[in-house]
């Protein structure tokens, strides 16, 4: 197989972008290319519900065992799986608009209702070190888990450090105010090349 560009990785047969957002919710938003337009992405990495599950395992949000069981469940519920994937892609757009302060009332409401639903679905269970919140392991788990994390990000101290790459629109955390690009290897480099071309023209 040909070598992939350095910002991509082949994970369990699925090509995924390497995380650059410094936060799993931002890396979730960055699972499509070019947020500069809202139409279909030139490159979409969440091409199936299974790819979404594998991405969750790749960024450490779900255990490989959990992903294995959910892939099995997914195999017997194609209609629900298609609906879950669409809900995931819809949430990704709404969340992007909320995080970049472009949300309309409608998109904010949609994102907020999903986050509330995820919070409402938590169960208080016994863990090794006392009590903890847990979501049921069903086909809604990966999206609801992301919605919980999105709720924390939107209401927590990291919110003010979310930045947008001026080239591709990807999001990343920049607590020290030093990052300009999502990645030097892609957008940073392209900008350098453009600047150089402009100088020699
Ligand atoms: Zn970029």
Image (cartoon, rainbow, N blue to C red):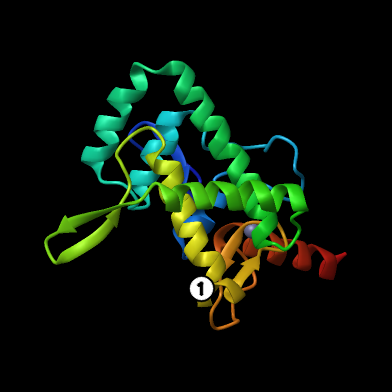
Q: Residue at x 30, y 41 (%)?
A: 136
Instruction: Identify whether 199 is placed above or below 37.
Output: below
Task: Indicate the position of residue 21 as horizontal and vertical percent values.
Answer: 51, 62
Q: Label 1 CB, ligand 1: below 8 Å? A: no
Q: Quadrant of the N terminus?
A: top left
Q: Quadrant of the C terminus?
A: bottom right
Pointer 1: residues within 10 angstroms few (<14), some, or many (20+)? few
Q: Secondary structure at mark 1?
A: loop
Q: Could you say which is closer to the camera, residue 154 or residue 54?
A: 154
The residue identified by callout 1 is 156
Q: Quadrant of residue 67?
A: top left
- Is residue 100 rendered to the left or right of residue 32? right
Tally of numbered tags: 1
Task: Indicate the position of residue 173 as horizontal and vertical percent values.
Answer: 54, 70
- Is residue 24 rendered to the left or right of residue 86? left
Instruction: Identify whether 47 is placed above or below 194.
Output: above
Q: Quadrant of residue 129?
A: bottom left
Residue 116 seen in render: yes
Q: Could you say which is closer to the camera, residue 59 or residue 71?
A: 71
Residue at the outermost bottom position: 176
Q: Residue at x 20, y 62 (%)?
A: 131
Q: Could you say which is closer to the camera, residue 98 or residue 132?
A: 132
Task: Indicate the position of residue 63 as horizontal and vertical percent values.
Answer: 25, 46
Q: Residue at x 72, y 59 (%)?
A: 167
Q: Quadrant of ligand 1?
A: bottom right
Instruction: Identify whether 118 is placed above or below 167.
Output: above
- Is residue 168 rendered to the left or right of residue 177? right
- Is residue 108 rendered to the left or right of residue 184? right
Residue at the outermost left position: 128
Q: Could you say which is closer to the camera, residue 94 or residue 126?
A: 126
Instruction: Identify whether 138 is placed above or below 161.
Output: above
Task: Indicate the position of residue 159 as horizontal and vertical percent values.
Answer: 57, 71
């Amino acid at each position: 197989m040909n070598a992939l560009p350095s910002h991509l990785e082949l994970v369990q047969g699925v090509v995924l972008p390497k995380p650059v957002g410094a936060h799993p919710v931002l890396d979730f938003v960055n699972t499509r290319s070019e947020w500069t337009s809202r139409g279909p992405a030139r490159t979409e990495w969440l091409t199936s519900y299974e790819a979404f599950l594998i991405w969750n395992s790749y960024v450490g949000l779900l255990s490989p065992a959990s992903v294995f069981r959910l892939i099995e469940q997914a195999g017997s519920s194609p209609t629900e799986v298609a609906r879950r994937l669409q809900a995931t892609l819809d949430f990704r757009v709404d969340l992007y608009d909320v995080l970049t302060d472009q949300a309309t009332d409608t998109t904010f409401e949609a994102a907020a209702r999903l986050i509330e639903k995820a919070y409402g679905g938590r169960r208080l269970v016994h863990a090794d070190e006392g009590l903890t919140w847990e979501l049921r392991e069903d086909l809604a788990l990966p999206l609801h888990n992301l919605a919980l994390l999105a709720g924390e990000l939107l209401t927590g101290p990291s919110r003010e450090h979310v930045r947008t790459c001026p080239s591709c629109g990807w999001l990343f955390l920049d607590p020290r105010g030093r990052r300009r690009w999502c990645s030097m290897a892609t957008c940073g480099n392209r900008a350098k090349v453009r600047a150089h071309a402009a100088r020699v023209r």
